[in-house]
Every structure is written in structure tokens, then in C-alpha cells.
Image (tube, rainbow, N blue to C red):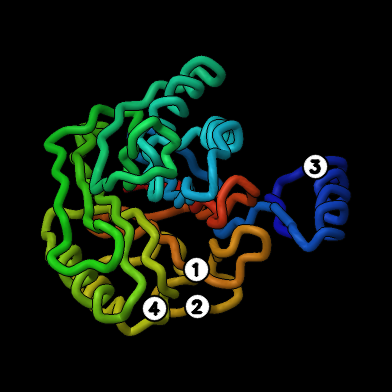
Amino acid sequence: MFTEKNSRPGKVFCVVLVALFLGASGLVYGVQTNGGGGSGSRSGLRVMTWNLKAEDGENFDGWVKVIGNQKPDIVGLQEACVTDVRGVMKQLKEKYGLTYHVKYGTTEKQWICRNIVKGAWGQALLSRYPLKDAVNVAYKKSDDVDRGYMAATVTVGGKNIRVFNTHIGKTAEVQKSELAEIAARKDATIILGDFNMAPDNPLLGPIWAAGFADADKHCYKQHPPQCTRTFPSGKPDKKIDYILLRGGLKSDKVEVYGTPSSDHRPLIAAIRW
């Protein structure tokens, strides 16, 4: 169980009791934190990436609660129904006073989106700052899912930041092709997404060679116990979700937030420059 360093004794005691209760069922939904404080500001951003796994059904209230409590400036979502994202944004504004701009990335039609006809399912990028110059690119090689990456620019404190969001495939052949393709983009400064592989996988070589670093320094080219692990959500034993940075961006704090609302834990980083 992980708690923040400056928690009051009483608060820690309560958290431990909750952990013991949940642990009895084998599920411990805590918060793993690496680093100190930090939050969004004119010289920083609070960024989240989260695979919602909407095909297992709507966990609508859970999605709203996690994003509302964490208050990220930018959110990269994968495996999300467009209709669900619209509803989440509506609830975030009504319940938490959070207003987001949105762009939708690579999507395909899926019955899981619970429409009369197949609904659009895939990636979305939410931002509290306007999203400019958005693009949506399908990968040249993919698997049984229509995959690609999306990108948009946000301007914070006069600094333009190009944010990418992607969901990499599952086979080595597809992963190698897709990673080489996104790594070749010279304009990316933040990449968010589900990569379906651990950080010590040699297929990530093009990403590291392009100058990216993991927001969590413990996860750069390695997968030690200290690395913020995101999957599976009940008892995460591996990191497959990423916040990658370059172009002078640094991270002060990285968290993995425990929740039963997806099979992935959301990954959150406080970024500065």
C-alpha cells in the first residue's frame, strides 16, 4: 500500500484500514507515488493516460470520479466509446466544475458502445486548454484492431506542447512497426498511451533513441519494483501504460491511481519545464 509522504497519522491509519479490508478479497486499490509534489500551472501540467477498457461495460461513475478527483489538465484515453466520453465530460463539468476540450482519434465501430447501431470506439484526448492543429493517423501495419495515433497542440504559458495519444498493438511484428512510426514524429513532446509492453522491452529502442524519457525515472529502459505499474488494476505487476517526455519537459511526481473502474490503473504525472 502506498501513501503520500506528508499524510497525517490519522489519515494514514484510515487508508491502512481500507487497504486491509480490500486486501481480504485480493484487490488493493491504493496510490503508488514516485517523486514529490507538483500540479498544473503556467509552467507545468498535470497529465493522465488511462485505458478505460469500455468493452467490459460502462464504469461511468467510476471514470467520472477518478478524473474529477485527480483534475488532470490533459487526459489521453484508450478503448473509450465516443458516447461515453461525451457523457463523462458533461458530468465532470456538472459535478466538479471541470471543462474539457476534446478530440477523437482512431476509432472503429463496436457494438460494445451500447448504441442501436455500432458506436465509435477508440482514443480520445481531453484538455483544459484548447486543442489546436489536431491530426489522426492510422498506422501502416496493425492487428485485429484499427490502430493509430492522434496528436494536438496545447499552449501553456506561451509554450506550445505537442501531445500524442496512441494504443500500440499486441504482436511483436505490429509493435515494432507502430513504435518506429510514432518515434519518427519530430514534433512530439509528450506521448501518452497503452503500449502493451514493459519498459525493458527492446522494441522500445526507437522511442529511447528519439530522445524520449519515461516520466517515472525508475521506468526508463528498465522494469524494477519501484517502477509505477499499471496492469492489471487489482494487483498490478507490470507497466504497460506510458507518459513519455522530451523537449525540456521534466516530471516532479508520478502516480498510479488504484481503481476497479478498468483493468488498467490510470497513470498521472506532474510535468514542468
> Mark 4 to mark 1: distance in Å?
12 Å
- The answer to the question of whether label 2 and label 4 lie on touching residues, with beta carbons closer than 8 A, is no
Residue 82 drawn at (x, y percent)? 35, 35
Residue type at the position of mark 3: Arg
Secondary structure of residue under mark 3: loop
User: Where 31 falls versus 67 (above or below)?
Assistant: below
Placement of 257 over or under 195, stated as above or below: above
- Contact between labelled residues 1 and 3, with CB atoms less than 8 Å apart: no
Asked whether, in this view, residue 52 is left or right of residue 260, the answer is left
* Count of marks overlaid on the render: 4
Q: Using the image as rendered, state which of residue 117 and residue 187 is in the foreground.
A: 117
Name the residue type under label 2: His
| Label 3 to label 1: alpha-carbon separation | 29 Å
Q: Nearer the viewer, mark 1 or mark 2?
A: 1
Residue denoted by label 4? 221
Q: Residues within 10 Å of mark 4 (few under 14, many from 20)?
A: some
* Distance (Cα) linking label 3 and label 4: 35 Å
**The disc label shown at residue 239, or none:** 1
Whether residue 23 is visible to the viewer of this picture, yes or no, is: yes
- Mark 4 or 1, nearer chain start: 4
Quadrant of res 155 = top left
Q: Are marks 3 and 4 in contact (CB under 8 Å)?
A: no
Q: Position of residue 64 (x, y in %)?
A: 54, 31
Q: For numbered disc 4, what is the local secondary structure? A: loop
Which residue: 54% across, 39% down? 58
Residue indicated by mark 2: 223
Work out how far the residue at label 1 is from the one at label 2, CA to CA, in angstroms.
8 Å
